[in-house]
């Protein structure tokens, strides 16, 4: 096994691709569990990337920080087997093995640094000398863990990589240049980089935002942007495109390259060939030396759409041009003059596919698929999106929106109300097909009208009342629609409570006025649930899907919640409240103190 530093002196280091998207895990099984349940399958994937020409492979342990935080009793066994399988695959090669650690929740009770350190120490005991912290949204706990690694393994190589949106910010609102400077200053990190979220071409623009980097720079993009088929999300960026864009970065000084979601052995093989065609010794140029990306070439198919949109919108300024688009084509809603197609909006098929898959699951299995709720915010600002629940989702045997919800009669309605609360408060414009608003049970049939007689039944009538109330609240509160293109309008309060299937976040308008949202997708009631809040003050529930007037079991909106100076994650203050099962609530501050 060659020393990583020796490889970097002569040529770029090539990593493997996206284990989590290439390995086909069984339904309800996380990829890391396959270390124990399907070791031969994981070994086969490792070897495929090595045969493609990878200089380094990652252990199949990306999700372990989250599992360790959730006190999964098998995380240690998964770590041990993950290291063993990767080391076994690389044993007869010169490839390096990196202990792979994804994002860790950061709470007062269990700080991220503690989670990372426990995992790093376990890998170090197994013989690891190379460590990768990847797809991070913040640097919480990383510097502390890196310093601990260096104390234990003085010659360790530590690479830290952040998941950054096309605007240069992570989902927690941290700019990539700030995070790179932070990791450089800590003194225990050997290389920094960017991975996931963006396609190869977009990564080039992100690299330009970094300025000068004193540490070797790593770039590991997705194969392309998510493409939605009937049953799953795929990444259809071609290997030739992937290899061409990353080879350009390598020629300009990026020292570590590889792939994330959707990158298969074919992508790595194409990049290997492209790198081998470059001079053996390349300058370790700072990121600032990467030249400005060339203006996109306009292909014939693009030219028609650009001309169409430019003509329609210039002659009819009030018109809307909306793309029902499910490929990896970038810049669909960006202006033609910068290479975009010029549409006003694009359907967010990824959000639609993920959320409908998630909400159709029995609540017992939702904690294992929590990413389906949160992944959409990794790319939410890359286009001007519409959240579509169209006719195509309630026909052809797919079931009506109400009938997609698991459970008994009452749980189906509760699930529908929760889903609608989540949809109406998520960034993006809304599209809801007729019949969903009052809970039609059967699929849409174009031969006949909707089942209006259902409004004679209380549950359907109250569901319609709930949708009406949501619409009125939405219109009256600019926080839910005014800022949809950057992190000023959305922040997670807690995206990581997968064990209870709860997400909390806030939406903000241009003046900073906020609406806080809590969605409980579990069929369990959570007593004294602690929720982080952005400021100290008193809060009240403005709308709850479990109110009796909307068909719920009842909820007292008169209760006031005074914040406590008890930190939760990144928030210095929090409140406690009782959360009904399968519910969504929107909270507002009555008064808040200055930060």
Image (cartoon, helix red, strand yellow):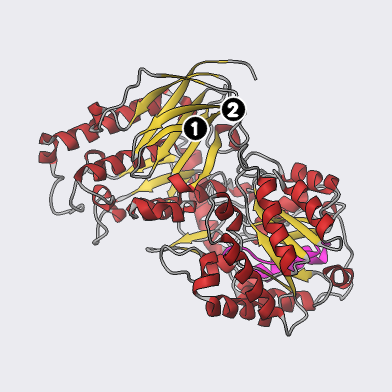
Mark 1, residue position: 530
Label located before the other in sequence (1 or 2)? 1
- Dot 1: within a 10 Å radius of its alpha carbon, few (fewer than 14), some, or many (20 or more) residues? some
The image shows residue 480 at horizontal and vertical percentages of 46, 31
- Dot 2: within a 10 Å radius of its alpha carbon, few (fewer than 14), some, or many (20 or more) residues? some
Residue in front for this viewpoint, 205 or 458: 458
User: Mark 2 and mark 1 in contact (Cβ < 8 Å)?
Assistant: yes
Q: Is residue 235 visible?
A: no
In the visual, does 575 lie left or right of 461?
right
Mark 2, residue position: 566
Q: Is residue 68 above or below residue 82?
A: above
Cα separation, mark 1 vs mark 2, equals: 9 Å
Q: At 26% across and 39% down in the image, what residue appears? A: 437
Q: Residue furthest bottom?
A: 92
Residue in front for this viewpoint, 27 or 429: 27
Q: Is residue 365 visible?
A: yes
What's the magenta region? 242-261
The image shows residue 472 at horizontal and vertical percentages of 34, 25
In the visual, does 179 lie left or right of 395?
right
Callout 1: SS: strand
Q: Is residue 355 above or below residue 456?
A: below
């Amino acid at each position: 096994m060659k020393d990583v530093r020796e490889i970097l002196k002569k040529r770029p280091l090539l990593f493997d691709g996206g284990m989590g998207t290439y390995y086909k895990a069984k339904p309800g099984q996380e990829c890391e569990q396959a270390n124990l349940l399907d070791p031969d399958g994981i070994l086969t994937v490792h070897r495929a990337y090595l045969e493609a020409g990878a200089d380094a492979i990652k252990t199949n342990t990306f999700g372990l920080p989250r599992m360790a935080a959730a006190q999964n009793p098998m995380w240690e066994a998964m770590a041990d087997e993950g290291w063993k399988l990767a080391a076994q695959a690389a044993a007869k090669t010169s490839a390096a093995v990196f202990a792979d650690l994804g994002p860790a929740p950061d709470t007062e009770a269990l700080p991220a640094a503690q989670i990372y350190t426990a995992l790093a120490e376990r890998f170090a005991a197994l013989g690891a000398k190379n460590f990768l912290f990847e797809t991070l949204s913040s640097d919480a706990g990383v510097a502390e863990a890196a310093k601990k690694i260096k104390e234990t393994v003085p010659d360790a190589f530590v690479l830290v990589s952040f998941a950054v949106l096309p605007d240069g910010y992570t989902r927690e609102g941290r700019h990539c240049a700030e995070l790179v400077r932070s990791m450089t200053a800590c003194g225990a990190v050997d290389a920094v980089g960017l991975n996931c979220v963006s396609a190869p071409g977009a990564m080039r623009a992100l690299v330009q935002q970094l300025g000068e980097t004193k540490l070797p720079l790593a770039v590991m993009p997705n194969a392309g942007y998510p493409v939605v088929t009937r049953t799953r999300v795929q990444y259809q960026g071609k290997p030739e495109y992937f290899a061409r864009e990353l080879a350009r970065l390598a020629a300009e000084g990026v020292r570590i390259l590889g792939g994330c979601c959707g990158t298969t052995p074919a992508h790595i093989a194409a990049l290997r060939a492209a790198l081998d065609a470059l001079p053996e010794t390349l300058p370790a140029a700072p990121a600032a030396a990467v030249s400005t990306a060339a203006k996109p070439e306009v292909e014939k198919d693009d030219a028609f759409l650009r001309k169409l949109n430019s003509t329609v919108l210039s002659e009819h300024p009030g018109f809307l041009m909306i793309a029902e688009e499910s490929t990896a084509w970038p810049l669909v809603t960006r202006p033609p003059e910068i290479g975009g197609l010029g549409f006003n909006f694009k359907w967010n098929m990824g959000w639609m596919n993920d959320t409908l898959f998630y909400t159709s699951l029995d609540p017992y299995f939702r904690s294992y698929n929590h990413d389906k709720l949160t992944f959409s915010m990794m790319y939410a600002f890359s286009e001007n999106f519409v959240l579509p629940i169209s006719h195509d989702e309630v026909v052809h045997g797919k079931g009506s929106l109400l009938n997609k919800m698991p459970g008994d009669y009452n749980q189906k309605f509760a699930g529908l109300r929760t889903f609608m609360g989540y949809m109406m408060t998520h960034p993006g414009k809304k599209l809801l097909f007729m019949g969903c608003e009052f809970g039609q049970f059967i699929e849409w049939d174009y031969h006949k009208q909707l089942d209006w007689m259902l409004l004679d039944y209380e549950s359907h009538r109250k569901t319609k009342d709930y949708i009406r109330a949501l619409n009125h609240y939405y219109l009256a509160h600019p926080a839910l629609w005014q800022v949809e293109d950057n992190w000023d309008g959305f922040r997670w309060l807690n995206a990581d409570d997968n064990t209870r299937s709860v997400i909390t976040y806030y939406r903000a308008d241009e003046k900073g006025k906020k609406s806080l949202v809590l969605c409980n997708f579990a069929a369990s009631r959570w007593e004294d649930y602690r929720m982080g809040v952005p400021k100290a003050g008193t809060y009240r529930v403005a709308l709850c899907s479990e109110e009796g007037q909307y068909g719920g079991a009842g909820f007292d909106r008169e209760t006031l919640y005074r914040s406590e100076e008890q930190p939760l994650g990144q928030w210095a203050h929090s409140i406690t409240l009782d959360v009904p099962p399968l519910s969504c609530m929107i909270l507002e501050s009555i008064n808040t103190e200055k930060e």
